[in-house]
Amino acid sequence: MCGISGEARFDGRSPDAAAVTRMTEALQSRGPDGEGLFTDGWVTLGHRRLTIIDLSDAGGQPMVRDDLGLALVFNGCIYNYPELREELRNAGYAFASTSDTEVILVAYAHWGERFVDHLVGMFAIGLVDRARRRLVLARDRLGIKPLYLAETPGRLRFASTLPALLAAGDVDTAIDPVALHHYLSWHSIVPAPRTVLRGVRKLPPATLRVIEADGRSREEVYWRPDYVREPADAGMDAADWRAAIGDALRAAVRRRLVADVPVGVLLSGGLDSSLIVALLAEAGQQHLRTFSIGFDSRGGEAGDEFHYSDLVARAYGTDHQRIRLADDDLVPAVRAAVLAMTEPMGSHDVVAFHLLSEQVARHVKVAQSGQGADEVFAGYGYHQPLTEAPRHGAAETFAAAFFDRDHDELRSLVGPAYALEHDASRELLTDHLAAPGAQTALDAVLRLDTHLMLPDDPVKRVDSMSMAWGLEVRTPFLDQDLVTLAAHCPPEHKVAQGGKGVLKAVAREVLPAEVIDRPKGYFPVPALRNVDGPVRELVAEALQAPVARERGLFRPEYVARLLAEPDRAEAAAGSNKLWQLGLLELWLQTHDVR
């Protein structure tokens, strides 16, 4: 797990090594254990290292194999690298390290651009094919590892975070009106390839991009499961699906134990993280370290779920640590979390993940997390009505349950310079849901959740907050084989038992019923959810700052109304409209975007 950066020039000029160095320095928290720089005429690569696999210098990056004519920077973990290394060794290749990084290099030498098909894991890759004068960029199937791009005539830069690109300089920082429309419609989600800044884009998940030395480039989506029923599965009943999903999840959890350092678990006390703990215990893991976080209660809303996390920790004898934070800690924590955000993220639990990661990183370098289970296995409340919706009605049903604002409200909110005549968010939603390859309305929405929304909300949130502390977080529910199997699973097995029915069936084999049948919980941060107390003062200060007034993102009368009547700020799925606006301005101001 690391931070990567690079610059390619297509105009005959040398790459700006100083700019790459600035990007690399901005990524220090993602890789506190080492750094490196490599130049090959038209391309310069930068790297910050977090030592997880092959702790020796032989695993350092940028990694260069002169005999293969290749150089590489890589962020992530390839879980099947031992098997791939053995296969490639049998094919006649030699290895100088025991790292997964070198396996990627040799895999490219052996399979060419199809090397991505053989990688099981999470990754963002920048690879220089020196003989062919090509730069190859690749991102993992579920977008767990980020890769940001800034392109200008004659130049391409890439980095693991958007702020790293800002550190390099010469970025168009104008606000993208379409991205702003998405942010304000979808709980602050801006799907790839856009970001909120016009001059920065993201390589989409499951995408391979090949850039030639003359600037020509091509992209390929190399993986996209269909959400349809497979003929081979026609005879499977609920028990068969429970067994198949259980086997795939067990394999996913075991895969994510590969490391040369201990692996812990972020244990919220919910079904998903509790199930990971149970399956690790079942696999024979002993002395497992688990971590939970809680906040002050507020207005009758509990600020922690320690009852459930304690129950699981006791049941499996984990070395468990509670982390409790008072509201007095919250405003400094918000500021620190905003600084760590690769993009503005309006989910109230992003601060909780930042604080939790800070504590966990003091004890382990790697942890497993339950992110993604709700999107893959239909765990949200809005999934239930979709079981009755016709295939053509998916967009209407989803929008009614999920959108924070409709287009008319957006027009009354956004400043004149950023207003759109067309409903960009509804158009993207409709196009994605209408695409072939999804059998039912729920299939289409689960595909949207997993492949469009999820990489730019919970996945990005966890990656940003954990890597701010040099903590690698692995997500077994986003295992490519498990996700493919779940895509083929009949929707009725997923929405059963109020959601995630097939997962609950698996869990009943290993978890106490009290954990399985409890009400659905979230990372509770009441002061953020309600935007009250010092948090409210912070938001008001950001929205009323001179730079905010000059930027003119939001109409002053709309902001004034939310500040005066906080009860009107509640949006879909427990999000808060005032927090979304304030967080965006906080992020722009923190990162000095003008």
Image (cartoon, rainbow, N blue to C red):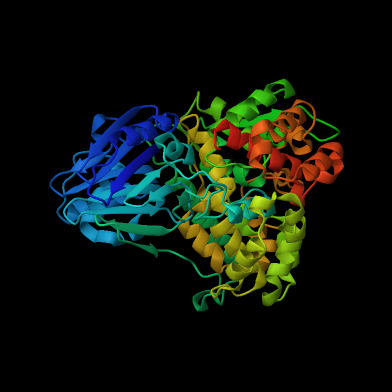
Front-lying residue, 283 or 258: 258
Relative image position of residue 110 (x, y in whole percent):
21, 58
The quarter of the picture where the C terminus appears is top right
Residue at horizontal 55 percent and vertical 31 percent from the top: 339
Quadrant of the drawing holding the N terminus? top left
- Left or right of 170 in this view: 10: left
Residue 290 in view, yes or no: no
* Residue 207 position in % (x across, y down): 41, 59
Across and down, in percent, residue 516 comes to 70, 48
- x and y percent of residue 191 in the render? 56, 55
Which residue is depicted at the point 71% across and 35% down? Answer: 543
* For residue 38, side relative to residue 26 (left or right): left
Residue 328, above or below 470: above
Residue placed furthest toward the left: 67
| Front position in the image: 465 or 421 | 421
- The answer to whether residue 234 is above or below residue 546 is below
